[in-house]
Image (spheres, helix red, strand yellow):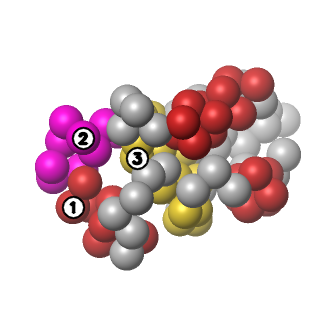
């Protein structure tokens, strides 16, 4: 039986070091993710704030869980790693 496909969206900016670390974490664990640049997309930034209550990045939506910042234990739990 194939592994369950994870659904991951990371709201980030090009200059965010924690965003880069989160994206490296996803690559290390072969997790596909959709990246949304909230610096370039104000609608996405508003969506991120609506979902998380946060204006700082990264905000990661992993399988329906909103994770604020690069929180490895929370990501591992949400992604069943």
Task: Give the extent of the magenta segment.
Answer: 36-44
Q: Earlier in the sequence, mark 2 or mark 1?
A: 2
Q: Nearer the viewer, residue 47 or 4?
A: 47
Q: Which residue is mark 1?
A: 46
Q: Earlier in the sequence, mark 1 or mark 3?
A: 3
- Answer yes or no: do the residues labelled 3 and 2 have beta carbons within 8 Å? no
**Residue at point 36% right, 38% down?**
13
Separation (CA) of disc 3 from disc 2: 9 Å
**Residue at point 57% right, 56% down?**
69
Q: Position of residue 36 (x, y in %)?
A: 35, 39
Reply yes or no: does residue 67 show up in magenta. Answer: no
Q: Give the quarter of the image for residue 67.
A: bottom right
Q: Position of residue 17 (x, y in %)?
A: 54, 36
Q: Which residue is mark 3?
A: 11
- Answer yes or no: do the residues labelled 2 and 1 have beta carbons within 8 Å? no
Q: Nearer the viewer, residue 80 or 54?
A: 54
Q: Position of residue 30 (x, y in %)?
A: 72, 25
Residue at the outermost left position: 42
């Amino acid at each position: 039986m194939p592994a369950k496909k994870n659904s991951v969206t990371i709201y980030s900016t090009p200059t965010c070091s924690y965003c880069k670390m989160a994206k490296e974490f996803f690559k290390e664990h072969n997790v596909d993710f959709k990246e949304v640049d909230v610096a370039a997309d104000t609608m996405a930034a508003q969506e991120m704030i609506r979902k998380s209550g946060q204006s700082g990045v990264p905000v990661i939506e992993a399988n329906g869980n909103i994770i604020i910042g690069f929180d490895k234990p929370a990501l591992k739990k949400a992604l069943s790693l």
